[in-house]
Image (cartoon, rainbow, N blue to C red):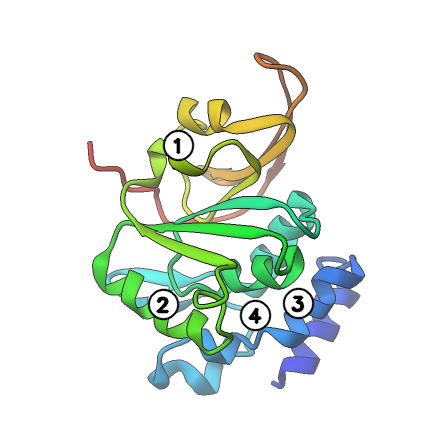
């Protein structure tokens, strides 16, 4: 499997649609975000282990969730559970130099892995991605409000911190158990919710 074949498959199956997101998948090579032992499997449409009991998500799931998120140039996005850094890099490619991605990772070893991977594209040194070590269930109030929030791990419910840290008109895309939930913030206290079923995610681990 090649990178181009994987992208073609994701387009054909309807997971990748938006030109800017397709372009991000072309520019940001998944192979740069897997461990050396997994390099030969980088373009398979499946989750792969990255150590510390974590995985780099299945390309189909990442494509589907980023399409739901609908990131735009210049936006500020909170990426919960940075893992390998692949999703943060894709988002950074889309938001561009005027935008910002705050990637939060609670496992110190994975934070280092993320940083090394992102620097292959100078995304940290250019200031487009900022990596924080910590419990992302509390969001990251220092950089709030966010235009968008996306999570890679399944919570039991959408944390109140995320809801308060998203701007009106903003969007949260996050897994809950075996579904993906989209919350659009339509006023200071109201959200419009959509849910998509049939997914599997690692659980969101919090410090509590």
Looking at the image, tell me whether mark 1 or mark 3 is earlier in sequence order: 3
- Marks 4 and 2, Cα distance to the nearest angstrom? 24 Å
Q: Which residue is mark 2?
A: 115
Q: Secondary structure beneath disc 1?
A: helix
User: Residue at the spot x=53%, y=64% of the render?
Assistant: 89
Q: Secondary structure at mark 3?
A: helix
Q: Nearer the viewer, mark 1 or mark 4?
A: 1
Residue nearest the observer in this picture, 198 or 88: 88
Quadrant in which the C terminus appears: top left
With respect to residue 16, does 74 lie above or below?
above
Quarter holding the N terminus is bottom right
Q: Element type at marker 4? A: loop
- Would you say residue 185 is visible in this rendering? yes
Q: Residue at x 34, y 32 (%)?
A: 138
- Image coords of residue 7 (percent x, y): 69, 73
Looking at the rendered image, the disc whose residue lies closer to the viewer, 1 or 3, is 1
- Work out whether mark 4 precedes mark 3 in sequence or the reverse, and give the earlier one: 3
Identify residue for label 3.
Answer: 24
Q: Which residue is mark 4?
A: 45
Which one is in front, 124 or 135? 124
Numbered badge on residue 141? 1
**Between marks 1 and 4, how big is the CA–CA gap?**
35 Å
Which quadrant of the view contains residue 13?
A: bottom right
């Amino acid at each position: 499997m090649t990178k181009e074949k994987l992208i073609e498959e994701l387009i054909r199956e309807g997971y990748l649609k938006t030109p800017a997101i397709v372009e991000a998948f072309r520019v940001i090579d998944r192979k740069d975000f897997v461990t050396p032992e997994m390099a030969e499997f980088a373009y398979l449409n499946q989750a792969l282990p990255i150590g510390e009991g974590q995985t780099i998500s299945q390309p189909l799931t990442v494509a589907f969730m980023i399409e739901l998120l609908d990131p735009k140039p210049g936006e500020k996005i909170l990426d919960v559970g940075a893992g390998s850094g692949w999703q943060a890099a894709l988002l950074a490619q889309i938001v561009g130099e005027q935008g910002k991605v705050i990637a939060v990772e609670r496992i110190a070893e994975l934070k280092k892995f993320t940083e090394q991977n992102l620097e292959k594209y100078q995304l940290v040194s250019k200031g487009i991605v900022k990596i924080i070590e910590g419990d992302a269930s509390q969001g990251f109030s220092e950089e709030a409000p966010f235009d968008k929030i996306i999570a890679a791990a399944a919570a039991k419910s959408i944390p109140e911190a995320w809801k308060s840290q998203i701007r009106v008109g903003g969007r949260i895309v996050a897994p809950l158990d075996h579904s993906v939930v989209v919350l659009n913030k339509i006023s200071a206290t109201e959200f419009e919710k959509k849910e998509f079923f049939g997914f599997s995610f690692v659980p969101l681990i919090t410090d509590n």
